[in-house]
Image (cartoon, helix red, strand yellow):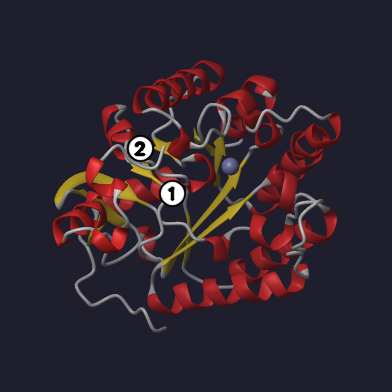
Amino acid sequence: MPTTDPETTTPSWQWPETTWRRHVDAVRAGRPLRPERWPDGARVAVALSFDSDHETIPLRDGQTSPGLLAQGEYGARVGAPRVLALLARFGVPATFFMPAVSALLHPEEARAYTRDGHEIAVHGWIHERNTLLAAEDEKELVGRALETLTEITGERPTGIRTPSWDFSDSTLDTILDLGFAYDSSLMADDEPYEILAGGRPTGLVEIPVDWIRDDAPYFTMDRYGAVRPHSRPRDVLEIWRDEFDAAYRSGGVFQLTLHPHVIGHRSRLTVLRELLDHICAHPGVWYATHADLARAVRTAPPAHEIPEHTS
Ligand SMILES: [Zn+2]
């Protein structure tokens, strides 16, 4: 449902300034939260995340073909164990955003995340598209997902990533009402920032994402679509290395969004291993879950210099 605002049923070129300003200001980046220094005097913060969607991508669209579900099953059966083993080998923590239906299908996997010292966080009920939902339905599903992950793992998540980073007009209210400490779905900066609602600070930390630092657009495809976006894994490694190197130079955050059913394949996991080799060869790296990062940027004094956007 695009909007219920009667003013916006008119074409955008006929909107008065108050209308387009109100929409732009509804959810906006506020003060930058990159701190003066990272914990332990580190030069860069590295926040890895894995969205354990598994079977919920086809289920979300009502697609029940065993062929499609098997692609998601690969994420749980093969991808997630490989990812956990790789993280254990490097001793690096990560955040796993998991739809509640995925956690109900794979409760042992959800518990393995927290048992191994990683963070589990909310990623919708069944990977629903928030912009297609009524506000009350969106809130009910997120609330149910929060309770479900808490029951399964015994730990109450403090963070949320909206499925497909789909952010409706009601999403921010839902996140604030349910008391989350951070969101990780928006793209207004490379570095964490505070979210403004209608120009007012909300206290909510945004840990921004971007499609550049996501495996899905490089590697997934629609079998019956004309586009074949497959990229060579080593080309993607180069992009992510450059992203890390620039974050390192500017003293910022390197955040990555991966999916066990995507990155868990052999040729791609090789790239993740080589990326971690590259990162771990640098001194002064702080490896943080998204919750750790949100806590650090909320409590530390912010950096005073202008963020280096050109590095
Ligand atoms: Zn997802």
Vertical placement of residue 178 versus 6, above or below: above
Vertical placement of residue 181 versus 17, above or below: above
| Label 2: few (<14), some (14–19) or many (≥20) C-alpha neighbours in 10 Å | some
Distance from label 2 to label 1 (Cα)?
10 Å
Dots 2, 1 in contact, CB < 8 A: yes
Q: Quadrant of ligand 1?
A: top right
Name the residue located 29 percent from the left edge and 51 percent from the top edge. 10
The C terminus, quarter of image: bottom left
The amino acid type of the residue labelled 1 equals Ser
Mark 1 vs ligand 1: CB under 8 Å? no
Numbered label attached to residue 171: 2
Numbered label attached to residue 185: 1
Q: Position of residue 217 (x, y in %)?
A: 65, 59
Vertical placement of residue 171 versus 279, above or below: above
Q: Would residue 172 appear left or right of 274 to someone viewing this image?
A: left
Q: Position of residue 229 (x, y in %)?
A: 73, 64
Q: Would residue 81 appear left or right of 46 to someone viewing this image?
A: right
Vertical placement of residue 222 versus 243, above or below: above
Q: Would residue 250 appear left or right of 88 to someone viewing this image?
A: left
Q: Position of residue 165 (x, y in %)?
A: 48, 47
